[in-house]
Amino acid sequence: MKDGLLLVDKHDGCTSHDIVASARRILRQKKIGHCGTLDPAATGLLLLTVGRATRLTRFLIRAPKVYEGSIRFGITTDTYDTTGETTASGDTAELTTDAIKAGMERFLGVYQQSPPPYCAKKVGGVKYYELARRGEQVPDTKKEVTIFELSMIGDWQPGEDLRFRLGSSSGTYARSVAHELGEHLGCGAALSSLRRTAIGTFQLADAITLEDLRQWRDGHDEALKSDPEADPPLPAAWIPFDRIPLPFDEVVADPQQERRIQHGQSILIREVACSEGDWIKVLNQRQKFIAVGSVVERIGTGDVGVVQPKVVFQ
């Protein structure tokens, strides 16, 4: 498990960096990163990049995310979730299921979202939550995000937390969605739970907990002690480097193209629908992942393009 992706089911009460630090100790691997932060109170899918795969983080972190969670109506907090201090209370006596559904529909599509005051976003090198903790004004710098889905899960009864599903572009704050929904409904709202269930094509159902990862590591070590030539099976949550799926097309380079890529030289690709600026995953004829390139030029009217390698792994 030196190079690849590890799908981890994050538990609550820890930061995403805590998970990375634990994975480094368990796998005895220093070079590990993650693709998309989860708040300490949130749980669910955290995608770890290991070894050479850390160079793919920028391509994976932009993947859309899917969450399931709950919203509590009638309160507003300084963190936009129920871990924070209550700043206001609202009347929910007139709140109805139809009103909630109509309010959710307003978020579908592209909109300008304000980040929560307590978040890791930075301004001038200082994180928002550091400013908020010092009592300083946090800038309201809106960001364009896209909501693909915002819907209720099951039935809702007055006085209960609302169960919801959220599908959104990368960088969307579920806490802000809950807060702004409460503002629209006029009663206030705060996120009471959140669990990430998908990142792009990666699913929570395939993830492993840290405890199970530790048990696998211990079993792996014991197997090698008894038989140094043994090849214990890897966890299903592990995706080897050559099999990492990326959100763009892939091509197979012939030996001559492979040599050009090794020297940072461009290659011609054919029979791939692409536009200038598109990314391309490049494999060699042995199905080894050798580079990520960018289409720098289209030639003629056919599916022919010039690809310049940007990240080379050989």
Image (cartoon, grey):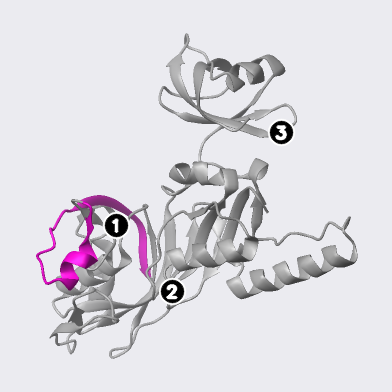
**SS assignment at label 2:** loop
Amino acid type at circle 2 is Cys
Q: Residue at x 77, y 66 (%)?
A: 221
Instruction: State yes or no: residue 291 in magenta.
Output: no
Labels 2, 1: front one: 2
**SS assignment at label 1:** loop
> Going by the image, does 309 lie left or right of 100?
right
Q: Residue at x 87, y 58 (%)?
A: 228
Which of marks 3 and 2 precedes in the sequence? 2
Q: Is residue 183 above or below residue 276?
A: below
Which of marks 1 and 2 precedes in the sequence? 2
Amino acid type at circle 3 is Gln
What residue does disc 2 label?
14
- Residue reaching furthest to the left: 137
Instruction: Say which quarter of the image contains residue 58.
Output: top left
* Residue 235 image offset from top left, x and y in percent: 70, 62
Q: Residue at x 61, y 22 (%)?
A: 262
Instruction: State yes or no: residue 137 in magenta.
Output: yes
* Residue 107 image offset from top left, x and y in percent: 26, 60
- Residue reaching furthest to the top: 300
Amino acid type at circle 1 is Leu
Quadrant of the image containing the C terminus: top right
Disc marking residue 287: 3
Query: Between residues 167 and 39, which one lies in front from this camera angle?
Result: 39
Is residue 230 visible to the viewer in this orientation of the structure? yes
Q: Which residues are magenta?
A: 125-151
> Going by the image, does 12 lie left or right of 95?
right
Instruction: Say which quarter of the image contains residue 241.
Output: top right
Disc marking residue 108: 1
> Going by the image, does 279 lie left or right of 148?
right
* Residue 146 image offset from top left, x and y in percent: 31, 52
